[in-house]
Image: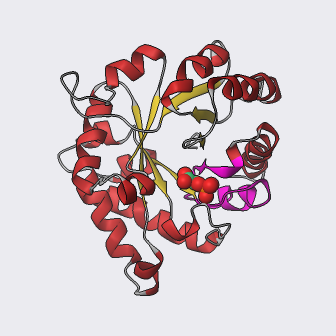
Amino acid sequence: MRKKVIAANWKMYKTPAEARKFMEEFVPLVKGHHRDHIVICPPLTDLHVVVEAAKETNVHVGAQNVYWELEGAYTGEISCGMLRGVGCEYVIIGHSERRQYFGETDDTVNRKVEVALENGLTPIMCIGEVLEERDANLTEDVLRRQVMRGLRGISGRKAAKLVIAYEPVWAIGTGKTATKEQAQEAHAFIRKQIKKLYNDRAGETVRIQYGGSVKADNARELMSQPDVDGVLVGGASLKADDFVGIINGAVEATKAGK
Ligand code: PGA
């Protein structure tokens, strides 16, 4: 059984003081939950506070972006070594907001995924179609392209460690979630691409999260699908109670046999 990854993407929300308050409330509520991996991805300026509060707990920490060079004159950028040094284990790469507003492409995603895997970070590689692409029946073409280009030159052994987040762009922050059938269909297709690119084993090992308007009341249903191995949560991860509700959804999905 693949371990689910339930990750909070705080985007550009919360000051260090707000992050500390969240963690004080959240950590005791998920104590003892070891079945799944719980990950908080705060803004860079909150990493210290969140890592400190997560120390010796079952809560893991990730960043929302990284640069592909290891060091150098790249004003404003952050390297894998810096993220590892502060205590990050995960890093979100190629989120649709970064593709949309900050010029990220499949090629930059590929460079970042590669460097993260080589430097001890688990990438959460985000992929997903926009509404026009879904309406034009292009979802599979887009997902195939994003997987193939995002993983270009990366070995199967390394790629097996990766987490992929399937986030249909039309579902992000819109309150419009993919149905469980739509999610399962896309996830199964993505897994098939990994198997084709590498082998069955890599395909069975890679964890594929769903993201896009995940809430406590749809989390269980989504994570009950055979190929949905967790969720990446934006809005509903900002309040401890809401996020705990989603984690409980994962527990129920596991109890029900997934
Ligand atoms: P949302 O965001 O849960 O607010 O839709 C998800 C994401 O962007 O990762």
Q: Give left or right: position of 100 versus 158.
A: right
- Of 16 and 8, which appears nearest the observer? 16
Residue 221 in magenta stretch:
yes
What residue do we see at 32% from left, 74% from top? Answer: 141
What residue do we see at 43% from left, 51% from top? Answer: 95
Rendered position, 232 above or below 46: below
The coloring applied to the image is secondary structure
What residue do we see at 22% from left, 21% from top? Answer: 71
Magenta span: 212-236
Q: Position of residue 2 (x, y in %)?
A: 55, 43
- Of 3 and 141, which appears nearest the observer? 141
Rendered position, 231 above or below 44: below
Residue 115 in magenta stretch:
no
Q: Position of residue 138 (x, y in %)?
A: 37, 80
What residue do we see at 49% from left, 63% from top? Answer: 187
Image quarter in which the N terminus is found: top right
- Of 184 and 243, which appears nearest the observer? 243
Residue 194: quadrant of the picture: bottom left
Rendered position, 168 above or below 32: below
Q: Position of residue 36 (x, y in %)?
A: 65, 36
Q: Position of residue 240 (x, y in %)?
A: 77, 37
- Quarter for ligand 1? bottom right
Q: Give left or right: position of 3 versus 24.
A: left
Q: Give left or right: position of 47 versus 111.
A: right
Q: How many marks?
A: 0
